[in-house]
Amino acid sequence: MKTLKNLGYLLGLPMLLILIWWAATLGTVNFFVPTPASLVKTFGEVWFSERFFTDVLPSVGRLVAGVSAAIVIGVVGGVLIGSVRWLRSLLEPTLEFFRAIPPPVLVPVLILLMGITDTMKVAVIISGCVWPVLLNTIEGVRAVDPVLSDSTHTYGIDGWARVRYLVLPSASPQIMAGVRQSMSLGLILMVISEMFASSSGLGFTIVQFQRSFSIPEMWSGIVVLGLLGVGMSFIFQWAERNILRWYHGQKEVENAA
Amino acid sequence: MQPDPTQAAPEAMLSVRGLKKVYQTDGGDVEAVRNLTFDLRAGELACLVGPSGSGKTTLLKCISGLMSPTEGEVLLDGKRVSGPPKKMAVVFQEYGRSLFPWMRVRANVELPLKNQGVPKAERDRLVDEALEAVGLSHVPRSYPWQLSGGMQQRVAIARAIAYQPEVLLMDEPFAAVDAQTRADLEDLIRTVWKKLGITVLFVTHDIDESVYLGERVIILSSSPTVVQEDITIDLPADRDQLETRSLPRFTELRHHVYEQIQLAKKGHRPAAAGSSAAGPTPATASGADVA
């Protein structure tokens, strides 16, 4: 019964939206807006084919590589900058400058520097996704409780052990908030990196369909992107529930008191 | 009578020599501690009381090596303290903020030992013993925040015991727990102290608690802090919340400490730092038992 209810919440609104869409396209022959039935048909034809391996998987691969690299760079850099005061003073103004640059404008620059390669596309994703993780990690590291820090100190837990047992777990709620932002940013940048001078990938394919007036195909590509976003969000929620179980539990206890 | 500020008594486990701490702030220097000198023998349980703002926490941070004094020094077993010493454990007042909320009770107690590279079997034994000693053997799988305040503080005490320190510092550990829990925890500390034979320095602002717990009470003056008086608590070794607290001697001692604190609050300072000729009770033994 409970599962059924949850399923109802999960699918209720999508069903309703599809219903409205179906009713609105009933009896019309607008070339630019396909009916649900024709879109489903096209979706199957376009994506359950070789294209899945030549366009979807490479895109997803670059997305995963870019976001993962951004998380690693962001966390490592954030722990360093957050822990070392002089490093923070030295870097913060410069970081603000780089953070303010919209990553899409870097695409032409990176093409010139790296050529039209996978590395270039991953670099575009990293250049945008690293900031939320980096800045949130710095904040999280700086906010370590001074009493907890003192007790860690008195038990001689220093250096790497301190990072592992105190700094990283303590900053993990902020780090996860940064990761969440960078995941959705990653999807956007994946598409953008493929729109310029590219020969494969989801972004490339969608633009290609649009230019050749394959309108239902273009729509089906957009649906793929949406589904990808939903998938990522589920993975994130699952990871967050496991990593931050203590945090949510503690908050619940605090709120109940 | 006055201990030589340059020379620690040879049998002293913990020795505070001419400690001074001045904080430099934007608004000018603040002298938190002026000149503190006292010794704790190995196996002694001493309470440190003082009016609020008398620099108790500053003193404790200097002793535990978290802060370096402006002048003077702290010696642990004859060696100068320059960082957190291995032979020392500290229990803080804020139990909710001194345990790792992302670790279960057992992992919290185990972590300092793990960090020191104590072998697994030995570690398990020490953790079991410590949890048993504080009466928490039944909750090793809980997270600290799932426990009551008193139980959380027990976990912190268990962690300190498992670490096998020679000196245990406690910074107003029971100030934030309710009165009944507090009485239990006081008895727990006496029991643990007797069983392990460790040196305990217990900082409190509660006069009753200091007299009930301590073998000795060191009274601090108001800021800038010096030792106002140092008295021996000549109550029976076996203490009981009801019996001991109703002894006439307990009342006398409590009365005396209370008076001294009131004097300290009014800004009265001892004639010479470290001595205490002013004590009206014959048991007052100040410098005599440290020199």
Image: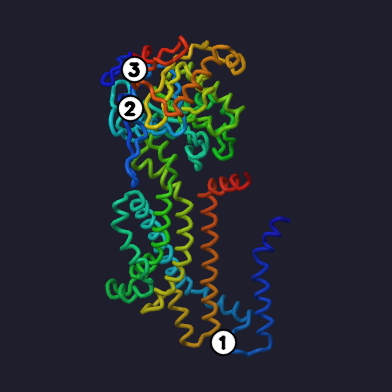
In this rendering, does residue B132 appear at all? no
Q: Compute the Cα span from label 2 to label 1.
A: 86 Å
Q: Decide which of tag 2 and tag 3 comes sooner along the chain.
A: 3
In this rendering, does residue B243 appear at all? yes
Residue under the image location 45 percent in, 46 percent down: A169
Indicate the colouring scheme.
rainbow
Q: Nearer the viewer, residue A49 or B181?
A: B181
Whether residue A88 is situated above or below residue B279 in the rendered picture: below
Q: Nearer the viewer, residue A62 or A248?
A: A248
Q: Position of residue A223 (x, y in %)?
A: 55, 74
Q: Compute the Cα span from label 2 to label 3.
A: 19 Å
**Label 2: which secondary element:** strand
Whether residue A171 is situated above or below residue B210 in the rendered picture: below
Q: Nearer the viewer, residue A39 or A154?
A: A154
Q: Position of residue B269 (x, y in %)?
A: 39, 25
Q: Position of residue B73 (x, y in %)?
A: 29, 27
Residue under the image location 31 percent in, 26 percent down: B74
Which numbered disc covers residue B29? none
Q: Chain of mark 3?
A: B
Residue under the image location 44 percent in, 67 percent down: A186
Quarter that holds the C terminus of chain A: top right
Q: Nearer the viewer, residue B69 or B198?
A: B69
Q: Nearer the viewer, mark 1 or mark 3?
A: 3
Q: Nearer the viewer, mark 2 or mark 1?
A: 2
Which numbered disc covers residue B12? 3
Q: Amino acid at mark 3?
A: Ala
Residue under the image location 43 percent in, 66 percent down: A63
Q: Are the residues at dot 2 and dot 1 in contact (C-beta closer than 8 Å)?
A: no
Category of crowding for the residue at label 2, using alpha-carbon neighbours closer than 10 angstroms: few (below 14), some (14–19), many (at least 20): many
Q: Amino acid at mark 1?
A: Phe
**Residue located beneath label 1 in the image:** A32
